[in-house]
Amino acid sequence: IISSNVPEKFSLGQNYPNPFNPATNIEFSIFHSELTKLVVYDALGREIVTLVNSELKPGIYKAEWDASKYNSGVYFYKLSSGGFTETKKMILVK
């Protein structure tokens, strides 16, 4: 957790750095205590890794993905928490 200040809404930030090699950070905000999932998918929509799968309290969080064992390419990450869902694109360049 980065901050326990209660955000005004759920949000999913763009990963940074992007493009990245081999690791990237993803920031997101949780508005209510909810079961929260942050999942990375490949360009074909296959689930690659689950970064977060737990009940989180309101706050601002950061998750790191170490993609050193994955191939270069486009990946997607999706945050689901309560009724909120958002997906963003990121690029791994080796």
Image: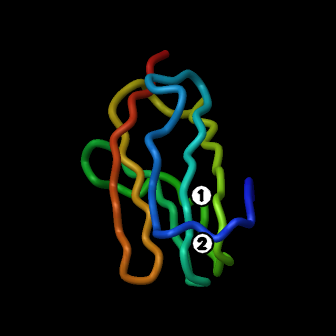
Left or right of 18: which side holds 26?
right
Looking at the picture, the colour scheme in use is rainbow
Measured along the vertical axis of the image, is residue 83 above or below residue 25? below
Which residue position holds label 2?
Answer: 53
Nearest the eye: 90 or 31: 31
- Residue drawn at x 60%, y 25% is 22
Amino acid type, label 2:
Asn
Which residue position holds label 1?
Answer: 51
Left or right of 62: which side holds 9?
left
Query: Mark 1 Cα within 10 Å, few/some/many (few <14, many 20+)?
Result: some
SS of the residue under disc 1: strand
Identify the image quadrant of residue 1.
bottom right
- Residue drawn at x 28%, y 42% is 43
Q: Position of residue 62 (x, y in %)?
A: 65, 51
Q: Position of residue 6 (x, y in %)?
A: 64, 71
Measured along the vertical axis of the image, is residue 22 above or below residue 15? above
Nearest the eye: 32 or 67: 32
